[in-house]
Image (tube, helix red, strand yellow):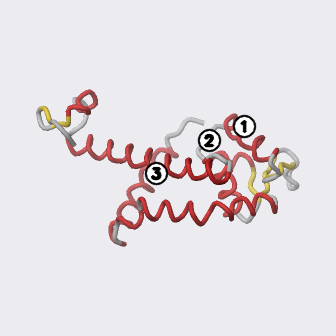
Amino acid sequence: MGERTQGKPVSLLGTGRHLSNLELETWTAFLDASRLIDEALSRHLADEHEMNHSDYEVLVRLDGSGGTLRLSVLADQCVSSRSKLTHTLNRVEKRGWIRRQPVDSDGRGLEASITNEGGIALAAASDKHAQLIRDNMLALWDPDELSVVKSSLQKATQHMRNNRRA
């Protein structure tokens, strides 16, 4: 990691006063890996499919839910504010990839549904998207390591979701 001072990499000293070496190196490894994979995935989506990662995630979440989700559930799944989600939905709706409609059962809320065009856009991007994830991260770990990473991230995600402000 380069030059060290008091056992900590020089570039990490600011935060290092508050975290142990192991905590600091784990945190920065997580940040670096997540930013680098997001950069690779975002570049692929923008360059080859003229969509951003938020667009792709909305299509994935809708497709994975059977095609339709209430907007409040979609916002929670995407870990997005309703305002940010609205901007994303406006963009993908203009492209014909989703449609919004009132919830039939109660008439109070709105739901979003993926369209045939959205399914086609998602299918066109998905194979390479998955391959980038596999090549840049998942294939680096054996099944036992994958299980540890999965359970660790699920634990952190659940904790943060439970303590998240509405």
Residue, disc 2: 80
Left or right, 2 with reference to 31: left
Q: Residue furthest bottom?
A: 143
Residue density around tag 1, few if under 14, some if 14–19, many if 20 or more, within 10 Å = few
Amino acid type, label 1: His
Residue density around tag 3, few if under 14, some if 14–19, many if 20 or more, within 10 Å = some
- Are the residues flagged by discs 3 and 1 in contact, CB closer than 8 Å? no
Residue 113 falls in which quadrant of the image? bottom right
Residue 87: give its label.
1
Per the image, label 2 sits on a secondary structure element best described as loop
Residue, x 78% and y 40% (percent of image)?
A: 90
* Mark 2 or mark 1, whichever is nearer to me: 1
Residue, disc 3: 37
In space, the residues marked 3 and 1 are separated at their CA atoms by 24 Å
* Mark 2 or mark 3, whichever is nearer to me: 3
Residue 135 falls in which quadrant of the image? bottom left
Q: Position of residue 22 (x, y in %)?
A: 22, 45
